[in-house]
Amino acid sequence: MALSGVEIFKLLPKTNCKKCGFPTCLAFAMKLAQAGVELEKCPDVSEEAKRVLGEASAPPIRTFALGIGEKAVKMGGETVLFRHDKKFFNPCALALNLKDTLSDDEIAKLASEVSGSEMERVGQKLRVDAVSIEYASNDSRRYEAVVKLVAEKAPFTAIILVCKDAAAAETAVKAVASRKPLLYGAASDNADAMAAIAKAHKIPLGVCAEGLEALSSLTEKIKSLGVDDMVLDSGAKTAKEIIENNTQIRRSALKKNFKPLGYPIINFVLRADPAVESAIASVAIAKYSSIVVISSIEKWKNLALFTLRQNIYTDPQVPMQVEQKIYKVGEPAPESPLLITTNFSLTYFIVSGEVENSKVPTWLAVMDCEGLSVLTAWAAGKFTAAKISQFIKESGVEGQIGHKELIIPGQVAILSGALEDKLEGWKITVGPREANSIPTFLKQRK
Amino acid sequence: MAYVVPKESYNGKVLGVSFGKDSQTLNFGGENTLPFLSFEGEIPAKPVIAFEIQDIPPDDWPETLKAQYAAVSSDPVKWAMHCQNELKAQAIALRLIGTHPDRENRSAQDAAKTVKDVLAAINVPLIILGSNNVEKDASVLVAAAEAASGHNCIIGKAQEGNYKTIVAAALAHNHKLIAMSELDINLAKQLNILITQMGFNKENLITDPMCSALGYGLEYTYSVMERIRLAALMQNDATMQPPIAGDVGMYVWKIKEVSALEAEVPLWGKLEERGVAWEAVTASAMLIAGTNLLIMRHPKAIETVQKVIGELI
């Protein structure tokens, strides 16, 4: 929670010495409140003031990475409870849970599947981000071997060590320390030992307790032991516990600046039925989880969860866009119709989906309008006769098709005259106003 | 630092709606807190899921979905009874899609007969939906409302272009009403105001801010619903307090992800499971955003979402 200028002023020396470059301490305080100057400019500031101001300026939810390298997942740093208020910044990680009691073959296979889970959707590369390795064998040498095997088979994937036995955990952490694994879980009965391991290896620590009161006192204790990066597990298992506890954690951090809960959240949503698990994972994705641990990664399930995560974490102020080009829907021939629309991803998806439903092979020209929908792009002067004709001429579509007819969206019927002037020799046809009329429109043309 | 539960206090509450007859009446809505936050408010009713059926065979549904109803979907009465008796549907949503001019262009009288036949065969509550053709729905839903007189149904959807006649029919025959606008909180609010200005009781109204499928604009629907709920609870905005409907099935079951064969897109995995997950994930996100009444299609997706609801309440 930011301090006001007057609150900051009370912490300053009040000598008006001008060494900071400002005429008075109050002026300096006012500038500090706007984050327009660094506190270090004041040579006489007390340690107490540094501490208070430092804490007040820290983000309400601590930010750090899960894993290393390009595929590390940034967590925390969120600033709002509702995505429409600004946006959600750091998409949650999806982690596959593996028990060390599985056979080596199964573990190798699953780790490779995680490693190869990447797919692309609307220009983003999406993947299962982590493997969570559960210590179920009660044999620390087995655990270490499994952790090494996973690290080898999934060389760029983040690793979560789910192990409450400090001795076994330490061995495993050492085996993959360079990968900066997340060590889960410190609980009330092993907090000192687990904190010592996390501190020694500079890795984040997963902290678990039943309920938020117990969890807060545990994170305070672990912080005092020198661990800064923590991940919270409130013990939430059911969908209701997930939504209620996660909401309380996010609210405490953002609205009350309650530091003991100002960390990213981990939720284990393990269910026997993969369809049910997908739906419960959806609750965690929508409601503030930073790591969602699941028990299976069927391709269909990954696709659904990746898509939901992408939807929830889309910036509401910046429309999703698709690439400007001439798309083929079906296997269009030179005489197939040519439609044009804008590159707002939703417009593209809906129009191409309806064209596909028509079963009429079609050329679909998608024009860069900075991600605006048809009517908005027209109103903003980005979908005009001049720009459309330039795009059509430069796209090279004239060499691909055997006719000169362009079908424009019904919403911009007004452009047809101007377009016929600009695109010499072309016939401009006004298509339907709404995408759901496209199948009827295309079929009737036959 | 001691932990204090960060509770919000809300000024408003979501209105409760009940539909159906006698012992089969269903309630939804009525909560005075954001979705499923029972630590700071009362949630008197669970969300309801209605099985969607249609007046004509669902030729345009993907094969994996059509197969679920292959034995019954040629006859809306059989289809309705199958959902009620075999699939244990809480409620049924009859979509009169055959009345659309681009489909079979069935008449309002045909639609009314289908409504009567279905009502005679079932005892769970019924939702009666038009074909979303603004002009045609104005006559179809009037005839359907009359045919269902006395059954306390939900009819819809009233839109800006046709609400007057549909509201009048719902008033005359004592039905509940779904008001639909297109993904804009201000349009939703405005339509609710216009409808209540006609003397329609806001406690009989349900808001449909327009659903969208996962990957196809879900985030827009999600945020419009969240904003409607916040307006209802935090600002006590009476025009935003009707419960919310999510017409999930019709948006999900027409996109590529639920019909593309695994052979065509191997990366997407098994088709049947993919379709079920798509509908279940879409519906779950809608619930979290504030939906009280879901309209869905695939029995396995409905079963899945019922389990989520079981965990949420």
Image (spheres, rainbow, N blue to C red):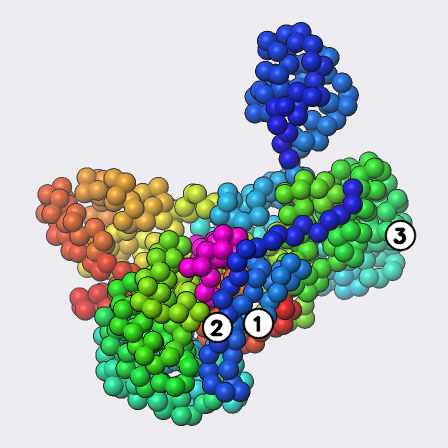
Q: Who's the residue at 73% across and 49% down the image?
A: B4
Chain letter of disc 3? A
- x and y percentages locating residue A22 in the rendered image: 59, 11
Q: Which residue is mark 2?
A: B17
Q: Is residue B160 above or below residue A44?
A: below
Given the image, on which type of amino acid does mark 1 rest? Ala
State the separation of the CA atoms marked 1 and 2.
10 Å
Report the span colored magenta.
Answer: B219-247
- x and y percentages locating residue A117 in the rendered image: 58, 55
Q: Nearer the viewer, residue B239 or A150?
A: B239
Which type of secondary structure does the marked residue at label 3 adopt? loop
User: Magenta stretch: residue A164 in it?
Assistant: no
Instruction: Count the labels in the image.
Output: 3
Q: Who's the residue at 38% across and 78% down the image?
A: B175
Q: Nearer the viewer, residue A145 or A54?
A: A54
State the separation of the CA atoms marked 1 and 3.
41 Å
Q: Which residue is mark 3?
A: A189
Which type of secondary structure does the marked residue at label 2 adopt? strand
Given the image, on which type of amino acid does mark 3 rest? Asp
Q: Which residue is mark 1?
A: B45
